[in-house]
Image (tube, grey):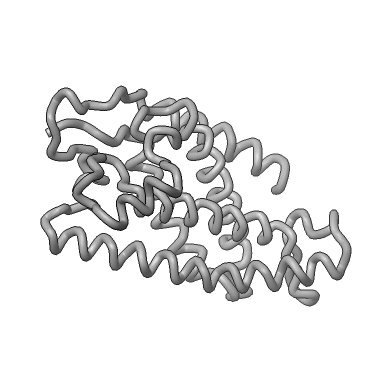
Amino acid sequence: MVKIWDGFIRGFHWLLVACFAGLWYTGGKLEHIDVHEMLGIFLLALLLTRIIWGFVGSHSARFRHFLVSPAATFRYMREPSSFRQHTHNPMGALSVLIMLLLLLIQVVTGLFTDDTIFYRGPLAHLVSSDMRSTLTSLHLLNFEFLKIIVGLHLLAIIAYRFFGQPLTKAMVTGMKQAEESEQPKLVNGAWGYVLLAFIYALLTWWLG
Protein backbone atom coordinates (compact mmCIF):
# COMPACT_ATOMS: atom_id res chain seq x y z
CA MET A 1 0.00 0.00 0.00
CA VAL A 2 1.26 3.47 -0.85
CA LYS A 3 -0.14 6.91 -0.18
CA ILE A 4 -1.46 8.37 -3.44
CA TRP A 5 -3.60 11.33 -2.33
CA ASP A 6 -2.46 14.12 -0.01
CA GLY A 7 -4.67 15.57 2.71
CA PHE A 8 -5.78 18.54 0.66
CA ILE A 9 -6.95 16.50 -2.34
CA ARG A 10 -8.97 14.23 -0.07
CA GLY A 11 -10.45 17.21 1.76
CA PHE A 12 -11.15 18.96 -1.54
CA HIS A 13 -13.10 15.96 -2.76
CA TRP A 14 -15.39 15.76 0.28
CA LEU A 15 -15.77 19.54 0.61
CA LEU A 16 -16.81 19.59 -3.04
CA VAL A 17 -19.40 16.87 -2.42
CA ALA A 18 -20.84 18.75 0.57
CA CYS A 19 -20.75 22.10 -1.22
CA PHE A 20 -22.45 20.75 -4.34
CA ALA A 21 -25.16 19.08 -2.25
CA GLY A 22 -25.73 22.32 -0.34
CA LEU A 23 -25.94 24.36 -3.53
CA TRP A 24 -28.37 21.88 -5.06
CA TYR A 25 -30.58 22.04 -1.96
CA THR A 26 -30.55 25.84 -1.65
CA GLY A 27 -30.81 26.59 -5.38
CA GLY A 28 -34.10 28.22 -6.33
CA LYS A 29 -35.17 28.69 -2.71
CA LEU A 30 -35.54 32.38 -1.91
CA GLU A 31 -35.31 31.80 1.84
CA HIS A 32 -31.88 30.20 1.36
CA ILE A 33 -30.47 32.57 -1.26
CA ASP A 34 -27.85 34.05 1.09
CA VAL A 35 -26.58 30.58 1.95
CA HIS A 36 -26.59 29.67 -1.76
CA GLU A 37 -24.45 32.71 -2.55
CA MET A 38 -22.05 31.99 0.31
CA LEU A 39 -21.64 28.38 -0.82
CA GLY A 40 -21.13 29.55 -4.41
CA ILE A 41 -18.29 31.84 -3.35
CA PHE A 42 -16.75 29.03 -1.30
CA LEU A 43 -17.03 26.70 -4.30
CA LEU A 44 -15.21 29.26 -6.45
CA ALA A 45 -12.43 29.44 -3.84
CA LEU A 46 -12.29 25.65 -3.74
CA LEU A 47 -12.01 25.37 -7.53
CA LEU A 48 -9.36 28.08 -7.81
CA THR A 49 -7.33 26.39 -5.08
CA ARG A 50 -7.61 23.03 -6.85
CA ILE A 51 -6.45 24.57 -10.13
CA ILE A 52 -3.41 26.11 -8.44
CA TRP A 53 -2.75 22.82 -6.60
CA GLY A 54 -2.83 21.12 -9.99
CA PHE A 55 0.39 22.94 -10.84
CA VAL A 56 2.24 23.20 -7.51
CA GLY A 57 0.77 20.42 -5.34
CA SER A 58 1.56 16.74 -4.99
CA HIS A 59 2.61 14.95 -8.16
CA SER A 60 -0.53 12.80 -8.10
CA ALA A 61 -2.63 15.99 -8.08
CA ARG A 62 -0.81 17.76 -10.90
CA PHE A 63 -2.67 17.93 -14.19
CA ARG A 64 0.40 16.99 -16.22
CA HIS A 65 0.67 13.72 -14.31
CA PHE A 66 -2.82 12.42 -15.11
CA LEU A 67 -4.15 14.29 -18.15
CA VAL A 68 -3.17 12.47 -21.34
CA SER A 69 -3.55 13.10 -25.05
CA PRO A 70 -6.75 12.23 -26.97
CA ALA A 71 -4.78 9.47 -28.74
CA ALA A 72 -3.85 7.91 -25.39
CA THR A 73 -7.47 8.13 -24.27
CA PHE A 74 -8.70 6.30 -27.37
CA ARG A 75 -5.95 3.73 -26.92
CA TYR A 76 -7.12 3.16 -23.34
CA MET A 77 -10.73 2.75 -24.53
CA ARG A 78 -9.61 0.03 -26.95
CA GLU A 79 -7.35 -1.75 -24.47
CA PRO A 80 -7.82 -0.69 -20.82
CA SER A 81 -5.28 -3.24 -19.56
CA SER A 82 -2.50 -1.46 -21.45
CA PHE A 83 -2.69 1.57 -19.14
CA ARG A 84 -1.30 1.48 -15.60
CA GLN A 85 -2.06 4.50 -13.44
CA HIS A 86 -2.89 4.70 -9.73
CA THR A 87 -4.46 8.15 -9.81
CA HIS A 88 -6.90 8.54 -12.72
CA ASN A 89 -7.15 6.48 -15.86
CA PRO A 90 -7.61 8.53 -19.09
CA MET A 91 -11.42 8.38 -18.93
CA GLY A 92 -11.41 9.31 -15.26
CA ALA A 93 -9.05 12.20 -15.95
CA LEU A 94 -11.34 13.41 -18.74
CA SER A 95 -14.37 13.28 -16.44
CA VAL A 96 -12.46 15.26 -13.78
CA LEU A 97 -11.57 17.92 -16.36
CA ILE A 98 -15.16 18.14 -17.63
CA MET A 99 -16.54 18.38 -14.09
CA LEU A 100 -14.11 21.14 -13.11
CA LEU A 101 -14.99 23.11 -16.26
CA LEU A 102 -18.74 22.72 -15.69
CA LEU A 103 -18.39 23.73 -12.05
CA LEU A 104 -16.39 26.81 -13.05
CA ILE A 105 -19.04 27.76 -15.60
CA GLN A 106 -21.73 27.26 -12.96
CA VAL A 107 -20.11 29.38 -10.29
CA VAL A 108 -19.00 32.17 -12.64
CA THR A 109 -22.42 32.50 -14.29
CA GLY A 110 -23.94 32.50 -10.80
CA LEU A 111 -22.07 35.71 -10.02
CA PHE A 112 -24.02 37.45 -12.79
CA THR A 113 -27.47 35.92 -12.32
CA ASP A 114 -30.55 38.11 -12.03
CA ASP A 115 -34.10 36.86 -11.46
CA THR A 116 -35.32 40.47 -12.11
CA ILE A 117 -37.36 40.44 -8.87
CA PHE A 118 -35.62 39.30 -5.69
CA TYR A 119 -31.98 38.54 -6.37
CA ARG A 120 -28.98 39.76 -8.32
CA GLY A 121 -25.59 38.11 -8.26
CA PRO A 122 -22.70 40.12 -6.77
CA LEU A 123 -21.31 41.00 -10.23
CA ALA A 124 -24.62 41.38 -12.09
CA HIS A 125 -24.29 45.17 -12.13
CA LEU A 126 -21.21 44.89 -14.35
CA VAL A 127 -23.09 43.57 -17.39
CA SER A 128 -26.13 44.58 -19.40
CA SER A 129 -29.65 43.33 -18.77
CA ASP A 130 -29.51 41.11 -21.86
CA MET A 131 -26.20 39.61 -20.76
CA ARG A 132 -27.59 38.97 -17.26
CA SER A 133 -30.52 37.16 -18.82
CA THR A 134 -28.22 35.06 -21.00
CA LEU A 135 -25.92 34.16 -18.12
CA THR A 136 -28.88 33.31 -15.87
CA SER A 137 -30.23 30.95 -18.53
CA LEU A 138 -26.78 29.40 -18.94
CA HIS A 139 -26.55 28.96 -15.16
CA LEU A 140 -29.79 26.96 -15.18
CA LEU A 141 -28.90 24.93 -18.28
CA ASN A 142 -25.38 24.13 -17.13
CA PHE A 143 -26.76 22.70 -13.90
CA GLU A 144 -28.58 20.06 -15.97
CA PHE A 145 -25.25 19.05 -17.53
CA LEU A 146 -23.69 18.96 -14.07
CA LYS A 147 -26.36 16.57 -12.82
CA ILE A 148 -25.58 14.25 -15.73
CA ILE A 149 -21.82 14.25 -15.16
CA VAL A 150 -22.29 13.76 -11.40
CA GLY A 151 -24.64 10.86 -12.08
CA LEU A 152 -22.12 9.25 -14.43
CA HIS A 153 -19.40 9.78 -11.82
CA LEU A 154 -21.46 7.98 -9.19
CA LEU A 155 -22.20 5.11 -11.58
CA ALA A 156 -18.47 4.78 -12.31
CA ILE A 157 -17.70 4.61 -8.57
CA ILE A 158 -20.30 1.84 -8.14
CA ALA A 159 -18.93 -0.05 -11.15
CA TYR A 160 -15.34 0.16 -9.92
CA ARG A 161 -16.40 -1.05 -6.48
CA PHE A 162 -18.16 -4.00 -8.12
CA PHE A 163 -14.89 -4.89 -9.86
CA GLY A 164 -12.89 -4.68 -6.64
CA GLN A 165 -11.57 -1.12 -6.79
CA PRO A 166 -13.05 0.89 -3.87
CA LEU A 167 -12.34 4.43 -5.06
CA THR A 168 -14.11 6.09 -2.13
CA LYS A 169 -11.88 4.31 0.39
CA ALA A 170 -8.79 5.75 -1.31
CA MET A 171 -10.30 9.22 -1.01
CA VAL A 172 -10.67 8.70 2.74
CA THR A 173 -7.34 7.07 3.57
CA GLY A 174 -5.29 8.33 0.63
CA MET A 175 -3.89 4.80 0.25
CA LYS A 176 -4.01 2.46 -2.74
CA GLN A 177 -2.56 -0.94 -3.50
CA ALA A 178 0.69 -0.36 -5.40
CA GLU A 179 4.41 -0.98 -5.30
CA GLU A 180 6.49 1.30 -3.05
CA SER A 181 8.45 2.36 -6.13
CA GLU A 182 5.22 3.92 -7.44
CA GLN A 183 4.85 6.23 -4.44
CA PRO A 184 4.29 9.77 -5.83
CA LYS A 185 5.98 12.79 -4.33
CA LEU A 186 3.45 14.38 -1.96
CA VAL A 187 3.20 17.95 -0.71
CA ASN A 188 1.90 18.70 2.79
CA GLY A 189 -1.84 19.16 2.27
CA ALA A 190 -1.97 21.83 5.00
CA TRP A 191 -0.59 24.31 2.47
CA GLY A 192 -3.63 23.67 0.30
CA TYR A 193 -5.95 24.63 3.15
CA VAL A 194 -3.92 27.77 3.85
CA LEU A 195 -4.27 28.72 0.19
CA LEU A 196 -8.00 27.93 0.27
CA ALA A 197 -8.54 30.13 3.34
CA PHE A 198 -6.63 32.99 1.72
CA ILE A 199 -8.55 32.79 -1.57
CA TYR A 200 -11.91 32.49 0.21
CA ALA A 201 -11.15 35.51 2.39
CA LEU A 202 -10.13 37.48 -0.69
CA LEU A 203 -13.28 36.53 -2.61
CA THR A 204 -15.52 37.26 0.38
CA TRP A 205 -13.94 40.70 0.74
CA TRP A 206 -14.37 41.39 -2.99
CA LEU A 207 -17.83 39.91 -3.54
CA GLY A 208 -19.38 40.15 -0.09
Q: Measuring 39% from the left and 48% from the top, which residue is drawn there?
A: 93
Q: Measuring 49% from the left and 29% from the top, which residue is drawn there?
A: 55
Name the foreground residue: 68 vs 189.
68
Residue 139, quarter of the rendered image: bottom right
- Rendered location of residue 116, percent (x, y): 80, 75
Name the foreground residue: 3 vs 86.
86
Does 188 appear above or below 170?
A: above
Q: Outermost residue toward the right?
A: 128
- In the picture provided, is 201 more to the left or to the right than 88? right
- Rendered location of residue 50, percent (x, y): 48, 39
- In the picture provided, is 175 more to the left or to the right than 140? left
Name the foreground residue: 130 vs 33.
130
Q: Measuring 62% from the left and 67% from the top, which residue is drawn there?
A: 33
Does 23 appear above or below 52?
A: below
Residue 148, quarter of the rendered image: bottom left
Does 124 appear above or below 138?
A: above
- Rendered location of residue 52, percent (x, y): 53, 33
- Rendered location of residue 9, percent (x, y): 37, 39
Q: In which quadrant of the rendered image does the N terminus lie?
A: top left
Residue 69, quarter of the rendered image: top left
Does 116 appear above or below 42?
A: below
Q: Measuring 17% from the left and 39% from the top, which residue is drawn there?
A: 176
